[in-house]
């Protein structure tokens, strides 16, 4: 279990809560998650984090309370155009939470409106485990039931879908909700409630919702969450616990692949100038202690905060 204390991160030079690595270097929580994804999950596949993926990870995990070092965000709403690696990114989160977070007996869930959608995130997670022997040694894949368990019995990952049996009584330390705009039915609302109530007993829970533009107005749940996120981004609401990231290309409903209009990247090239999925961003070999790994060069995205919605306030009580 990581033990965090105020230090200067050896990787991004930020003064914040850090753990001391075995090599003696302090590492902040943003660098920890970024490095895990880069080196343990993505590298064996020959991938590198896309700028937006890096930014979301660093923001979600690296924003901590000054006094406690606990993660500030308990829910994340991330809206990004289709085919930009949303499901793939959140497929890595259960593995991160099973092995790297400070939760006793972690329970991670990948939830979606339909079984096949929940299976997409599981598939990404399984791909990460299969392609890294270090992960396979610690995590057992149960593909037929779409589950993963830590081999020491210390945690599990399972899929949930609104078209299946909604399990009450779960206590997620992490829940990733894919394609929130497809959560339209009463059963989807129930699943959402089960998840957000289930996290209450956890020390540092996290619910990550990802979505894209589409038939969103058919989903009241999507609409509610999107409105919270939008109001956070325009500054009319504040929350310490709700992370909002909406990429503008999403709003323009570009739909398929390249973000032709994402020229507003801060310090980074628009994706349109890159061949699709050519790894972008920095490699982690950029020199320990050098560089500013907080400037992601991500496209326009403005995490701000809002008045906590009721269900989150409940979820946050612990
Ligand atoms: N950083 C990356 N580098 C290379 N390939 C990536 C990266 N991230 C995702 N991909 C690949 O991009 C493809 C699309 O990813 P994914 O299905 O996660 O997108 P999505 O945004 O969830 O799409 P949709 O909106 O259709 O659900 C996948 O084949 C995935 O392996
Ligand atoms: Mg997807
Ligand atoms: Zn750092």
Image: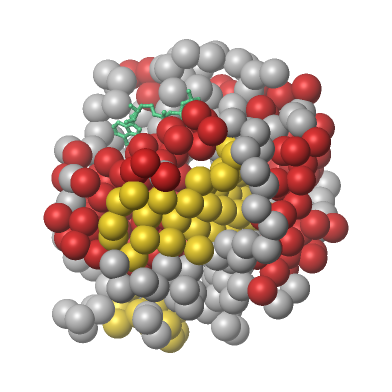
| Position of 161 relative to 303 (above/below) | above
Q: Nearer the viewer, residue 318 or 58?
A: 318
Percent position (x, y) of residue 263? 47, 23
The part of the image, by quadrant, that contains residue 67 is bottom right
Percent position (x, y) of residue 71? 55, 69
Name the residue: 53% across, 14% down: 255
Q: Describe residue 126's horizontal placement relative to residue 238 as left or right.
A: left
Percent position (x, y) of residue 152? 30, 73
Q: Would residue 60 be seen by someone viewing this image from the given angle?
A: no
Name the residue: 59% across, 27% down: 212
Quadrant containing the C terminus in the rendered view: bottom right
- Is the image coloured rainbow, by chain, by secondary structure, or in one colour? secondary structure
Quadrant containing the N terminus in the rendered view: bottom left
Percent position (x, y) of residue 289? 23, 67
Q: Nearer the viewer, residue 314 or 282?
A: 314
Q: Would residue 94 be seen by someone viewing this image from the given angle?
A: yes
Name the residue: 29% across, 67% down: 151
């Amino acid at each position: 279990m990581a033990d965090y204390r105020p230090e200067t991160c050896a990787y991004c030079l930020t003064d914040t809560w850090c753990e001391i690595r075995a090599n003696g270097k302090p590492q902040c929580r943003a660098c920890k998650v970024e490095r895990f994804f880069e080196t343990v999950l993505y590298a064996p596949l020959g991938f590198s984090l896309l700028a937006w993926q890096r930014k979301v990870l660093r923001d979600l995990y690296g924003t901590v309370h000054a006094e406690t070092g606990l993660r500030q965000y308990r829910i994340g709403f991330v809206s990004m155009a289709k085919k930009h690696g949303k499901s793939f990114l959140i497929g890595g989160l259960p593995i991160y939470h099973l092995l790297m977070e400070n939760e006793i007996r972690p329970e991670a869930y990948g939830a979606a409106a339909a079984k096949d959608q929940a299976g997409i995130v599981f598939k990404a997670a399984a791909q990460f485990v299969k392609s890294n022997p270090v992960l396979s040694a610690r995590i057992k894949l149960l593909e037929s039931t779409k589950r993963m368990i830590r081999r020491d019995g210390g945690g599990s990952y399972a899929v949930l879908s609104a078209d299946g049996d909604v399990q009450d009584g779960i206590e997620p330390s992490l829940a990733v909700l894919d394609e929130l705009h497809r959560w339209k039915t009463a059963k989807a609302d129930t699943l959402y409630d089960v998840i957000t109530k289930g996290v209450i007993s956890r020390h540092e829970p996290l619910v990550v919702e990802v979505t894209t533009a589409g038939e969103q107005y058919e989903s009241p749940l999507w609409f509610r969450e999107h409105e919270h996120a939008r109001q956070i981004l325009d500054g009319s609401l504040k929350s310490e616990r709700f992370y909002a990231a909406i990429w503008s290309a999403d709003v323009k409903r570009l739909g398929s692949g390249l973000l032709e209009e994402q020229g507003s990247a801060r310090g980074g090239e628009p994706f349109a100038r890159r061949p699709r999925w050519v790894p972008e961003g920095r490699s982690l070999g950029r020199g320990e202690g050098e560089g500013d790994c907080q400037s992601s060069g991500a496209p326009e995205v403005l995490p701000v905060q809002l008045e906590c919605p009721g269900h989150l306030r409940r979820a946050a009580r612990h």
